[in-house]
Image (cartoon, helix red, strand yellow):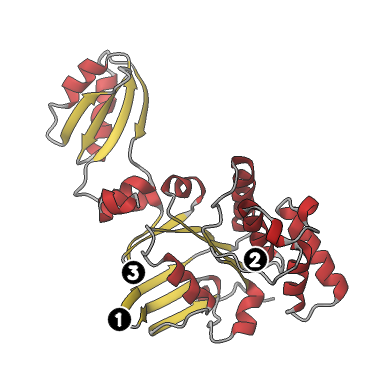
């Protein structure tokens, strides 16, 4: 009976990895151990997301450091691309091919026979809902359709690791929801889905963990709630819905850990900023016993956008 694989063979690992393009920094001193699930690389253009993905897939080699994908180095491309699927943010297709031919010719690179290539190509096409357009030339596809056929190519050989650069760009809401559902299906099977995005609210919706990048450096990593809780120097914002927002604002502002308390613009709640969320929640339990009916309590900034603004500044995070 075989046991579970070694830990290193279930992770995407970067050890002190740097990549320079001449004197231009791509990424610097990156050390990561990425587990299965949906991991989002977050940052503005130029932060190092694409360089990091190209390092994982072997399209560029590190200036220094080591990269391993489930125990395999990118210096072994034939092994690596049997377990990894990559969809870049750039459109580049052989001229004159249909969507089906594009996938079929890609699968032939793995040494598969005609029947297996045909079967896997149609299976991938079905999974991205492109059957009706499969026999049309890729050159005639819309941007959203090209995104989907690239995703089909990335998943066609049933990889254990998906690396997807801006995969949700140009997708309409329905297709976007279907694509996110596909990511979750892969993650639920114990696979890696590594996506990049600069649209921060989307990251909140899909990620098991995030890696925040700025100017080639990793500035934070982990589950977004954990990352947020570590930023002690920035007050946490909490929105409380209640029947007497004015009275609540006056009451909580007496506490030394509350730095701001103001009635929400809609008049139905209070926005609190506190330096100690744990103390605040304990205090709120007492207030609720003293005549103020609290309808709901929710963090107002427990999301990637807020964390990113805290870490690198609001101006850069909105580029």
Query: At numbered mark 1, what does the secondary structure look like: helix, strand or loop?
Result: loop
- The residue pinned by badge 2 equals 154
Q: In this view, does 116 lie to the left or right of 232?
A: right
Q: Mark 3 points at which residue?
A: 216
Looking at the image, which is closer to me, 284 or 126? 126
The residue tagged 1 is 23
Asked whether disc 2 touches disc 1, contact meaning CB atoms under 8 Å apart, the reply is no
Residue placed most toward the observer, 115 or 295 = 115
Q: Which residue lies furthest to the right in this view?
A: 115
> Is residue 115 positioned above or below 125 on the image?
below
Does residue 307 appear anywhere in the picture? yes
Vertical order, 80 against 174 (above or below):
below
| Residue 158 falls left or right of residue 269 | right
Q: Is residue 138 left or right of residue 58?
A: right
Residue 29 in view:
no
Q: Distance between the residues labelled 2 and 1?
A: 32 Å
Looking at the image, which residue is at 33% across and 19% down?
Answer: 266
Give coordinates of residue 307: x percent, y percent. Answer: 32, 49
Quick one: quadrant of the N terminus? bottom right
> Residue at 77% of width from left, 77% of height from top?
108
Ranked by sequence position, the earlier of labels 2 and 1 is 1
Q: In which quarter of the image is residue 99?
A: bottom right
Label 2 sits on a secondary structure element that is helix
């Amino acid at each position: 009976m075989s046991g579970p694989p070694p830990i290193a063979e279930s992770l995407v690992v970067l050890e002190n990895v740097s990549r320079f393009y001449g004197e231009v920094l791509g990424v610097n001193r990156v050390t990561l151990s990425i587990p299965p699930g949906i991991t989002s690389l977050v940052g503005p253009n130029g932060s190092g997301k694409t360089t990091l993905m190209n390092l994982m897939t072997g399209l560029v080699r590190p200036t220094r450091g080591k990269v391993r994908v489930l125990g395999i180095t990118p210096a072994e491309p034939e092994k690596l691309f049997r377990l990894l699927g990559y969809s870049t943010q750039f459109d580049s297709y052989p001229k004159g091919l249909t969507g089906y031919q594009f996938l079929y010719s890609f699968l032939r690179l793995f040494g598969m026979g005609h029947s297996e290539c045909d079967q896997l190509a149609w299976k991938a096409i079905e999974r991205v809902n492109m059957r009706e357009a499969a026999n049309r030339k890729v050159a005639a596809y819309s941007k959203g359709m090209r995104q989907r056929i690239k995703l089909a190519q990335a998943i066609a050989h049933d990889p254990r690791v998906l690396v997807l650069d801006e995969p949700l760009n140009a997708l309409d809401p329905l297709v976007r929801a279907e694509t996110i559902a596909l990511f979750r299906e892969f993650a639920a099977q114990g696979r890696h889905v590594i996506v990049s995005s600069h649209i921060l609210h989307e990251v909140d919706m899909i990620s098991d963990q995030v890696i925040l990048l700025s100017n080639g450096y990793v500035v934070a990593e982990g589950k977004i709630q954990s990352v947020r809780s570590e930023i002690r120097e920035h007050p946490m914002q909490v929105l409380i819905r209640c029947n007497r927002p004015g009275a609540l604002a006056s009451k909580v502002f007496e506490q030394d850990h509350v730095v701001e308390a103001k009635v929400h613009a809609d008049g139905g709640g209070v926005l609190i900023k506190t330096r100690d969320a744990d103390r605040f929640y304990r205090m709120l339990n007492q207030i609720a016993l003293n005549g103020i009916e609290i309808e709901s309590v929710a963090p107002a900034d427990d999301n990637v956008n807020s964390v990113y603004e805290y870490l690198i500044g609001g101006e850069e995070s909105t580029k």
